[in-house]
Amino acid sequence: MLKSTHVPDLSAREVAPILAALQAGTDPGKLTQELASRYPDNSGTARRLVDIALAYLWLAEGAPAGDVLTMLECRHRFEFSSAACRVYALEILWAAEREIHAHELDPNPAPKELQNAAA
């Protein structure tokens, strides 16, 4: 059975370089290997971080969820059985969608908004 997609709480400062590297065209596989050195006890964490960031970028750019799911399955088709690969891809897709919805529905206004709020 696959592990949960729970990713350690990371600040925007820690996630920003992953997103920036992916946006700059860095190969996700190479980025995963680089990050795995930061998480020697759990190399799956690096894979999940990169996959969630990659799925997030695809969804944010308007890619259909089905395309994101296919991309994730193709990236890991040799690592897992086909059923486990589908489950993993769905978990990553859901995690990325939660991130997008969290940003859309963020109940906490930005500090600048608070500063400009009427008293």
Image (cartoon, grey):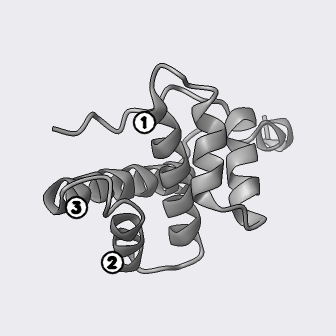
Circle 2 residues within 10 Å: few <14, some 14–19, many ≥20: few
Residue 105 has which mark? Answer: none
User: Which residue is at a point 32% across and 60% down the rendered structure image?
Assistant: 78
| Label 2 – label 3 distance at C-alpha | 12 Å
Of the 4 image quadrants, the one containing the N terminus is top left
Q: Is residue 65 left or right of residue 58?
A: left
Q: Helix, strand, or loop for circle 1?
A: helix
Q: Which residue position is annotated with label 3? A: 86
> 119 or 60, which is in the foreground?
60
x, y percent for residue 18: 68, 48
Q: Residue at x 78, y 34 (%)?
A: 119
SS for dot 2: helix
Does residue 105 lie above or below 57 as drawn? above
74 versus 6 height, above or below: below
Residue, disc 2? 66
Question: Are circles 1 and 2 on residues that touch, CB within 8 Å?
Answer: no
Percent coordinates x, y for residue 109 in the rendering: 67, 41
Few, some or many C-alpha atoms within 10 Å of disc 3 (few <14, some 14-19, many ≥20)? Answer: some
Circle 1 is placed at which residue position? 44
Q: Nearer the viewer, mark 2 or mark 3?
A: 3
